[in-house]
Image: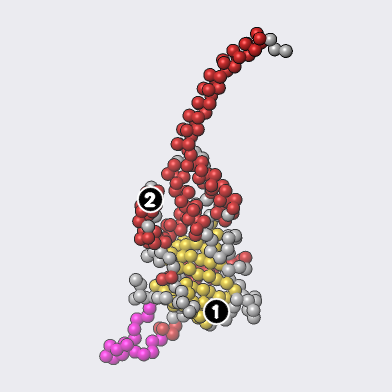
Amino acid sequence: MLTAEDTLLRDEDDEKTKPWLTYALAAFAIFVGIYSVKWGFQSLTWIEARAAADANPWLATTPQPLPPPAQPLAPLPAPPPPAKGKKGAVAKGNAADKNAPALIKLYNFQFIPPWPGNYKPDPSPTGNYTTLRFESGQVLVFYNPESQLDSLATLKQSDPANYQKFAAIFSGSPIENNYALFNAVYGAAPSAASPFMNGLDAERLHTLLGWKLAFGPDLTESGPFHSFDYGAIKGFQFGEPANEKPVAVRAFDDKNRQFRYIFVVSGGANANAVITQEQINTAVGTLKPVPFLDR
């Protein structure tokens, strides 16, 4: 049983402890305040990035460069000089045209066919794409470049205020064309987030990861993801032909135009048809505007 003296001594001890507890709580509150001001947004970005990666595993995938082509890509043939008659008129039968390899020409662009033999073009009713069905069993879908969204121009024109914020975030490494935009977006990964990273870097990563979720992968949310650089043509490849699944390609030229391909085997009577990486390289790497129609 506690005596009056014991109670008095315990109360005195409690009074001596309270100031230290008060100081500790105050110090903790100051620390939380400083942390929130200096690293609060970074920590929130880090937490959100980890949660988004758990819900969307593809978000952690970044494009791996494709190996260079095993053989140099065949150049497109130069247009032959016109054959002239005695009076300088263009002759009707030009032998040079017959010797030149046939090119696929769609929407004012051309490229070397990736497979030999005949093919049947099947334009879509909307005019947004054309399906090429090769007699060897492969199918190539080529989209009208005019139907591809100009993401950067859309951002500038539709929401100038948001674009100004976007430009400020990326002021250190400005994004000036659609390829640079897609490259930055697809190259972002949750693993780059840290509670103690630079504030502007955190804001940039937060924006890029949000756009990456919005852009998403092409055709599939799993499988290999690659980048490529053929000089004037750069872009991204979703999937690999070795997996015997459709392969999608998004390419960009040096005039900020975007192109989309889909490669797939039709099956059926040509169940043994295959698509190789070199064939994809040929169709994408030799893409050029039709002569005299470059805009």
Span colored in magenta: 79-95
Question: Above or below — where is 231 with respect to 122?
Answer: above
The residue that label 2 is drawn on is 165
Q: For mark 2, does the 10 Å Cα neighbourhood hold few (<14), some (14 to 19), or many (20 or more) residues?
A: few
Q: Position of residue 245 (x, y in %)?
A: 61, 68
Of badges 2 and 1, the one in the foreground is 2
The residue shown at (45%, 62%) is: 234
Residue 65 in view (yes/no): no
Q: Amino acid at mark 2?
A: Lys
Residue 251 placement, left or right of 50: left
- Residue at position x 54%, y 48% from top? 49
Residue at 43% x, 60% y: name it: 179
Q: Estimate the x, y position of residue 78 in percent, counting from the top left.
A: 39, 76
Q: Is residue 264 left or right of residue 101?
A: right
Q: Which residue is mark 1?
A: 133
Mark earlier in primary sequence (2, 1): 1
